């Protein structure tokens, strides 16, 4: 069945795209939830309008992400933590702690889910934390864990 997506769907497509999907998937999930509408002959103009709106929104979000990235790459975020004599922390630093420190020190608010740590930071020192604010904007945030 041919459908036009009304919202971005991970691993499926973006808003305004015309897709061929299984009949059952369209009837049982996409159409009842309002994620898609059936594609007809007159729907092409509406799909084009959706794509244009999506492109404008995406360009605006990318520009905002690049502005934030430029300002954060140049800064070092310092987080004071209690640590033992050999530099191991009493506890750990998670993405939530880093997001709070960024908001406090730079007044830029970044969602903690945009920061990616393989595991929490458990030692003093300087660490690079990858941040992805947009699909095309990924940059490292320098975090320095200092003794409190």
Image: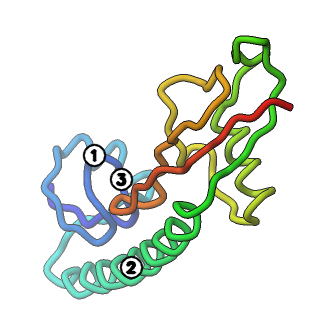
134 or 24, nearer to the observer? 134
> Local crowd at mark 3 within 10 Å, few (<14), some, or many (≥20)?
few
> Local crowd at mark 1 within 10 Å, few (<14), some, or many (≥20)?
few
Q: Mark 2 to mark 3: distance in Å?
A: 18 Å
Cβ–Cβ below 8 Å for labels 3 and 1?
yes
Residue on which the image places disc 3: 9
Dot 1 lies on which element? loop
Give the mark toward the camera: 2 or 1: 2
Q: Residue furthest front?
A: 85
Cβ–Cβ below 8 Å for labels 2 and 3?
no
Residue 97, given in percent of the width and then of the height, sits at 73, 38
**Would you identify the image quadrant in which residue 103 lies?**
bottom right
Note whether 81 is above or below 67 in the view shown.
Answer: above
Q: Residue sitting at 75 percent across and 35 percent down?
A: 146
Q: Mark 3 to mark 1: distance in Å?
A: 6 Å
Residue 56, given in percent of the width and then of the height, sits at 39, 84
**Would you identify the image quadrant in which residue 75 lies?**
bottom right
The disc, 2 or 3, on the residue closer to the chain's N-terminal end is 3
Left or right: 141, with 88 as reference point:
left
Q: Residue sitting at 70 percent across and 12 percent down?
A: 86
Dot 3 lies on which element? loop
Left or right: 80, with 143 as reference point:
right
Q: Mark 2 to mark 1: distance in Å?
A: 21 Å
Note whether 122 is above or below 148 in the view shown.
Answer: above
Dot 2 lies on which element? helix
Give the mark toward the camera: 2 or 3: 2
Note whether 48 is above or below 14 in the view shown.
Answer: below
Residue on which the image places disc 1: 11
Residue 11, given in percent of the width and then of the height, sits at 27, 46
Residue on which the image places disc 2: 59
Residue 74, given in percent of the width and then of the height, sits at 55, 64
**Would you identify the image quadrant in which residue 25 lies?**
top left
């Amino acid at each position: 069945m041919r459908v036009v997506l009304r919202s971005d769907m991970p691993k499926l497509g973006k808003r305004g795209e015309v897709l061929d999907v299984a009949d059952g998937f369209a009837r049982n999930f996409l159409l009842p939830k309002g994620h898609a509408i059936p594609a007809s002959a007159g729907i092409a103009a509406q799909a084009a309008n959706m794509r244009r709106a999506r492109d404008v929104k995406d360009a605006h979000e990318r520009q905002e992400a690049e502005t934030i990235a430029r300002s954060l790459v140049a800064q070092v975020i310092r987080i004071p933590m209690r640590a033992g004599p050999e530099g191991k922390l009493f506890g750990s630093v998670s993405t939530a702690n880093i997001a709070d420190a960024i908001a406090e020190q730079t007044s830029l608010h970044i969602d903690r889910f945009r920061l990616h740590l393989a595991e929490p930071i458990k030692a003093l020192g300087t660490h690079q934390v990858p941040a992805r604010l947009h699909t095309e904007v990924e940059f490292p945030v320098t975090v320095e864990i200092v003794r409190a």
